[in-house]
Amino acid sequence: MVDASGDVKAKARRSTLYRLIDTDCTDAGLREALSDYYASHEDFTVESTQIDGIPAIAIWGIVGKKDRADWSAVFKSLTGKDANIANRAAAGAVAVGVSGGPYILTYGMGHLLIDPSRIDPGFGLSFSIRSIEPELIRQVTRNILDSRARVDRSTVPGGQSIRGFGIEFYGEVVSRLAGTLEKVAMTFNREKPKKVSIAAADSLKIPLGVSPADLVGDLHEITRITQTSSPVPELGFIDQIRSLKSSNKQVSKLEDKLSQALGSADRGPLALTLPAECEEHEHAANSYRIKIASDRFEILEEIEIANILERVESLPPSERMDALRSGYIQMCSDSEGRVRVSRQVKAHKWLAFEAGLEAGHYFYHQGRWFEVGDNYIDFLQTRLDEVFARPASIPLPKWDSRWAEEEDYNKEAAKLIPGGAVCLDRKKIHTKQHPYGIEACDIIGPNNELIHVKRASSSAPLSHLFAQGWTSIEALRADREAREKLLARIRQRSSTHGFDPSVKPRKLIYGIAIKDDATVSRGNLFTFSQVALMRAINALENADVDVEVVPIAQ
């Protein structure tokens, strides 16, 4: 709270905090952590100071153009009124050279004032998994480790257990948490116990002391927690994916693999992903500034992986990553790319990539290399080996070389399955809830088993198969119209099959064949496909659906 004179009355104020890397806790070091553009801009002031005897740098000013808002012409055309106003916003930051940091507090659009390369990635998450109440999580953002590099955000305003978000502990990278903080020795709860909301990603949004001594004390407590406390057991899985330092000898080899993929027609598991710091601005983005391997930026209405690849594929492999690291992509709220809502995020942070190297599993995410932890690999392999070892309730016939297409196999397999199965391949069901249609299954078994079949040579088709299976179960269990239309479709092929639309499906079977492999096993599935399969199995089993994976011999 601020009184009429501008003085702060509350002892703590919600602030956004970053931790800096590669930065000395000196006046000169703190200045180097600021954005050169804003630190030298005429609309900004940069001054040295001290906070409780500790070196600090304060920077403040106005962000935005001084000319008219880009929508003023349309506004005048519609209303006849001349809205002569500009898009401008206050920005401030205070860098503090406290031991264990340094740290920088930002206000308004102050996050734009930091040199992005100095931000400690994952700092906020590191604090939150060691301090947040695991039963009172309000929001989770996770990046799904599949071929689409999908981002999922889930919110429960009142908070719930982390388990309630249905996180696949070993198949996702959590990039943001929001929840409740209570049991820490900080200014906000010094006089009496108090619960506060925090949000954590690379930054940490948390109430901090407004007096110099209180602020420094809070920063020391944050340092203590991140450096000496163990993660809360329920959140420990977030630490199962490890970041590699640039000095790690594997990084240069992995970067060579990524550089080759950037110029290859067969680029493998390479995808576009949304940087964590852009997530909160995504809803406001109507255009993108992109500047890669060029002296000028361009404005795009949408951003796709092809927009990045076409700008670097003609470069020598050794120059591709440098071009991405020196280039940027920036979100803008207007279609002309004039009103910026995010910082200029280095282009390499928009990529997701997976690579195997010397028996290890690695992936590139948010501009960093990660090694998948031993527990992750052990868990994934153990679970999938158990799934593949389950006896098949319906033996699927060998894939005869005469059957060139999946449709051929499905028609013949349905005839050979004992008890009476029906081939429904390529027959979609359209309902009010699913106007674009769903593929219920390729074959429906004699006891209403939904059988999905795929013969593939890469992870992408298999990932689609696994997602298709879950989508069909979800639709058929939730939508009676879908079950009734499935019965009508079955009746077009068989008058005797005993499908009952009043009974929800209880079993799903994935039938898999891989070209040039005699028998499918966990070992000859790509890691992305393994992750997609494990996610589908967990989702299905949580819905009380039995799952089988049946290798199809060739």
Image (spheres, grey):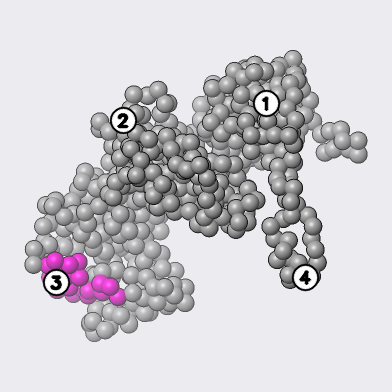
> Where is mark 1, residue-wise?
95
> Which residue appears at 35% of the width and 45% of the height?
313
User: Which of labels 3 and 2 is toward the front?
Assistant: 2
Residue nearer the viewer, 243 or 444: 243
Question: Could you say whether the residue bearing mark 4 is in a helix, strand or loop?
Answer: helix
Rounded to the nearest angstrom, the CA distance separating label 1 from label 3 is: 70 Å
Residue farthest toward the front in the current orientation of the protein: 295
Question: Could you say whether the residue bearing mark 3 is in a helix, strand or loop?
Answer: helix
Residue nearer the viewer, 469 or 297: 297
> Where is mark 4, residue-wise?
79
Q: Residues within 10 Å of mark 3 (few under 14, many from 20)?
A: some
The tag earlier along the polypeptide, 2 or 4, is 4
Amino acid at pointer 3:
Glu
> Where is mark 2, residue-wise?
253
> Which residue appears at 75% of the width and 24% of the height?
47
Question: Could you say whether the residue bearing mark 1 is in a helix, strand or loop?
Answer: strand
Rounded to the nearest angstrom, the CA distance separating label 4 from label 3 is: 67 Å
Q: Position of residue 386 (x, y in %)?
A: 25, 46
The tag earlier along the polypeptide, 1 or 2, is 1
Q: Position of residue 267 (x, y in %)?
A: 30, 47
Residue nearer the viewer, 459 or 441: 459
Compared across the picture, whether 307 is left or right of 209 comes to left
Amino acid at pointer 2:
Lys
Rounded to the nearest angstrom, the CA distance separating label 2 from label 4 is: 60 Å
The tag earlier along the polypeptide, 1 or 4, is 4
> Where is mark 3, residue-wise?
412
Quarter containing the C terminus: bottom left
Rounded to the nearest angstrom, the CA distance separating label 1 from label 4 is: 45 Å
